[in-house]
Amino acid sequence: MSHTNIPLAGVIGCPVGHSLSPRLHGHWLKRYGIAGHYVPLEVQPDDLVEVLGAMSRMGFVGANVTIPHKEAALRLADQVSDRATLIGAANTLIFRPDHTIYADNTDGYGFMQNLRQNCPDWNPKAGPAVVIGAGGASRAIIVALLDAGVPEIRLTNRTRLRADQLKSEFGGKISVYDWVHLDRMLEGAATLVNTTSQGMVGNPPLKINLSDLPTSALVTDIVYTPLETPLLAQAREHGCRTVDGLGMLLHQAVPGFYRWFGTQPTVDEELRQVVLG
């Protein structure tokens, strides 16, 4: 008796109830007529080793990992992509038939694809990029920007030490500014990225004066609740092109879906609406 396994995937987090990934991957599974499932998996940090060890034996072909498991997932993988190693975290796991785990990080890819799709004439080489925040997302974005040929990254973080650590790791193209000098970073910049949670629903807005930012600059925020953050509204009024953060979430999901289910999915307006609910 032969049978076809129904491939399973999911998102591992703690908490995970807020994740939009099940809605996102569920829509693609339905759209492409794939007999598979993508489920939220709430896993405590102490249980991660055991859970990852069992998943491929349960029919899982892969998983996304989110807070607080991204660094641990990288350490527990058998094989790791170069970009995940550089970023120091994994967000996408592939479970191989021999039960080994391959870890990747698609956050930087998602970030770049979002800008390329929504602002096709953006040129990363045109001038410095200002990056606000030095957390996990910031690391992925810095790696992607350097890769895309950005000539200089001006980095600031509320706690300067974290920004200094990123400079010591990623090198000479990064210059660190004190948080109080936020407005001084903008002159001549071609790209401005907010990777902090400031401006997100329930958080204070990012206090920044954009008067020195060239109107030719592209401004993006990785927050997508609300879609237009106070920063993006301010940038639009200043005359800059803006890209919201939802596309980063949508695009970072593409490589995983392709590896797990064998179909290259499309990011379009219909998907945006489904994920926004």
Image (cartoon, rainbow, N blue to C red):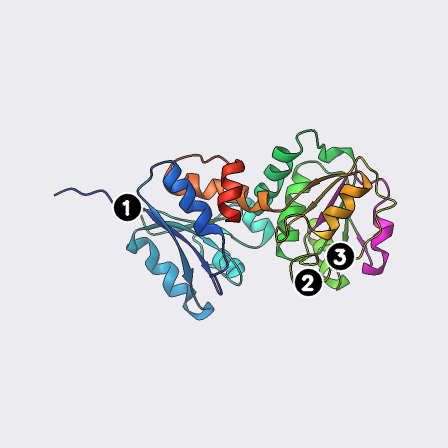
- Position of residue 194 measured from the top left corner of the image (x, y, whole percent): 71, 51
Q: On the image, numbered disc 1 is attached to which residue?
A: 6
Secondary structure beneath disc 2? loop
Q: On the image, numbered disc 2 is attached to which residue?
A: 203
Residue sitting at the far top: 121
Q: Is residue 230 above or below residue 247?
A: below
242 with respect to 59 (left or right) = right
Q: Earlier in the sequence, mark 2 or mark 1?
A: 1
Label total for image = 3
Q: Quadrant of the N terminus?
A: top left
Please name the amino acid that badge 1 sits on. Ile
Which residue shows up at 48% across the image and 44% down it? Answer: 274
Q: Is residue 156 above or below residue 253?
A: below
Disc on res. 122: none
- Alpha carbon distance from label 2 to label 1: 41 Å
265 with respect to 214 (left or right) = left
Q: Earlier in the sequence, mark 3 or mark 1?
A: 1
Q: On the image, numbered disc 3 is attached to which residue?
A: 206
Please name the amino acid that badge 3 sits on. Leu
| Mark whose residue sits in front, 3 or 1 | 3
> Badge 3: few (under 14), some or many (20 or more) residues near its Cα, within 10 Å?
some
> Badge 2: few (under 14), some or many (20 or more) residues near its Cα, within 10 Å?
few
Q: Which residues are magenta?
A: 176-194
Nearer the observer, 206 or 92: 206
Please name the amino acid that badge 2 sits on. Asn
- Position of residue 11 measured from the top left corner of the image (x, y, whole percent): 44, 55
Is any part of residue 220 visible from this angle? yes
Is label 3 in contact with label 1 (beta carbons under 8 Å)? no
